[in-house]
Amino acid sequence: MKNIKSKVNEEIARGHLGPNEACEYYPCHYEGQDCTFCYCPFYPCMDERLGRNFKRRRGDTVWDCSPCLFIHDGDVAKHICERMEEEGIRDADDPRIKDLFGPAVEMYLLKRSSA
């Protein structure tokens, strides 16, 4: 988790990126995806509309968000970056990040339902 937080901190410092066609993994999800956040700053969000708890063979559970594309939506990524800038959020461990999640998810779900 420490490595993920470190990567998210780099992404926060960089700011909004949009699609990154120069990345060797692009597109890892879909053509035109927003690559601002390769790692979700909200992981694990525990929102069952976006993922699920997955029980592993050894009996423990892990949050599985592999089907979630929320953070790669351009409008969502831009909104989150703007809000982080407004709030002065510069670190993935800043507890205020959690306040950005709900409105961003609602934006995403509303956009998806009207498409």
Image (tube, grey):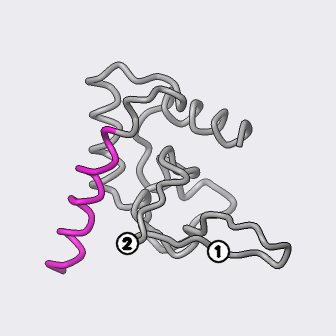
Q: Nearer the viewer, residue 12 or 65?
A: 65
Asked if residue 38 is among those painted magenta in the image, a careful observer would answer no
Mark 2, residue position: 49
Mark 1, residue position: 54
The label shown at residue 68 is none
Count of marks placed on residues:
2
**Label 1 secondary element:** strand
Seen from this angle, which residue lies furthest right?
58
Residue 39: image x %, image y %? Answer: 58, 50
- Look at the image and tell me in which quarter the N terminus lies: top right
Amino acid of disc 1:
Phe
Residue 8: image x %, image y %? Answer: 57, 38
The magenta stretch is 99-115
Residue 2: image x %, image y %? Answer: 72, 36
Q: Relative to residue 103, is residue 30 depicted above or below?
A: below
- Residue drawn at x 33%, y 42% is 80
Amino acid of disc 2:
Arg
